[in-house]
Amino acid sequence: MTIETDALVVGAGPVGLFQVFELGLLEVKTHVIDSLPYPGGQCVELYPDKPIYDIPAVPVCTGRELTDKLLQQIAPFGPTFHYNQEVSTVEQQADHRFLVETNRGCRFLTKTLFIAAGVGAFQPRTLKVDGLDAFEGSQLLYHVKNPVDCAGKDIVIVGGGDSALDWALHFCAGNPDGNPHKASSVILIHRRDGFNATPATITKMRTLCDSQQMQFVVGQVTGFEASSDGRLSQVKVTGPDGITRLVPLDMLLVFFGLSPKLGPIAHWGLDIERKQLAVNTETFSTNVPGIFAVGDINTYPGKKKLIVCGFHECVLSAFGAMPFIFPDKKVMLQYTTTSPKLHKVLGVASAVFD
């Protein structure tokens, strides 16, 4: 079965979600594909609870809060989401529409394609220890979806960036809202006594170590031991002195960062510059008419990788797509403050404006 649509957005991060909004104002229904099992992209995958300070008119919000607000904003347009899927092929048809197929066999026939895939599909940088991948998803985690799974357990965290230190602090202190995630013990392991994290976070971590609420060990994980029932029970940590020590654990959390990969996008016939898509800044169209790129995936002179810049790109790409979607329709710029038509589209037609 092939789904026919006017617009298909690849990427459900903040920019992809705002692209849905801008298309919705122009009465374009959209389908959205994302490789993650939930919306939010980098904001939710990398820093769901860290503050963001540069969203216009929002002094501070977390990545998760920003995603929730965007989902609320696009709700009147009823987009359809397709999660846990990556676009595998894009083929232009004789009628100039694009036949798009995902790695799970979902097929779309769309007039326009908007690539808002950040810097590509994210894959965690893994801990290279033979046999350790057998515990991935149970005792070995590369990102934490349910912190309660770690409550009351002996946790070893590996890494030296903000994510590693933030989770170490979180599991030491627990959750202040009354649903504690506090671990029985927390040991942080990093290859050196230096961190790529914010100074305030490093200071908090060292304070917790000084008060014996957690431990920090300099070294690298070089092996592991399993119990008789097949569970991960200890990791081998080799220090700078060359001595390997056994560290007992219930859960192993590894934060080496995420590696962005263009994946199949690299084979769609698009102009690529340093793993980014070249665009025309008048409409943010790629070299293939009808395919647009917004957000961190694109590049052009003066490009700034900021969420607010991606929002601006969404506006121009939505208008740039109108000749492909409604070729016989004259599209006028309207304002949400005064346009009765936009009020109706947004579901606020009954609102009273002075």
Image (cartoon, grey):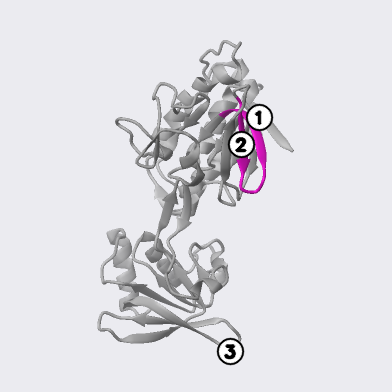
* Viewer-side label of 2, 3: 2
| Residue 5 tag number | 1
Residue identifier under label 3: 228
Q: CA distance from mark 3 to mark 1?
A: 54 Å
- Quarter placement of the C terminus: top right
Q: Nearer the viewer, mark 2 or mark 1?
A: 2
Along the polypeptide, which appears first: circle 2 or circle 3? 2
Query: Of 208 and 39, which appears nearest the observer?
Result: 39
The x, y position of residue 137, in whole percent, is 56, 67
Identify the residue at image location x=30%, y=60%: 196
Amino acid type assigned to the residue bearing label 2 in the image: Val
228 up-or-down from 9: above or below: below
Q: Which mark is residue 100?
A: 2
Is 211 situated left or right of 338 in this image?
Answer: left
Q: Magenta span covers which residues?
A: 97-112
Is residue 136 visible from the viewing direction of this image?
A: yes
Residue 56 shows in the view: no
Q: CA distance from mark 2 to mark 3?
A: 48 Å
Instruction: Give the spatial CA distance, label 2 vs label 1.
Output: 11 Å
- Vertical position of residue 178 compared to residue 259: above or below: below
Q: Are marks 3 and 1 in contact (CB under 8 Å)?
A: no
* Quarter of the image where one finds residue 247: bottom left
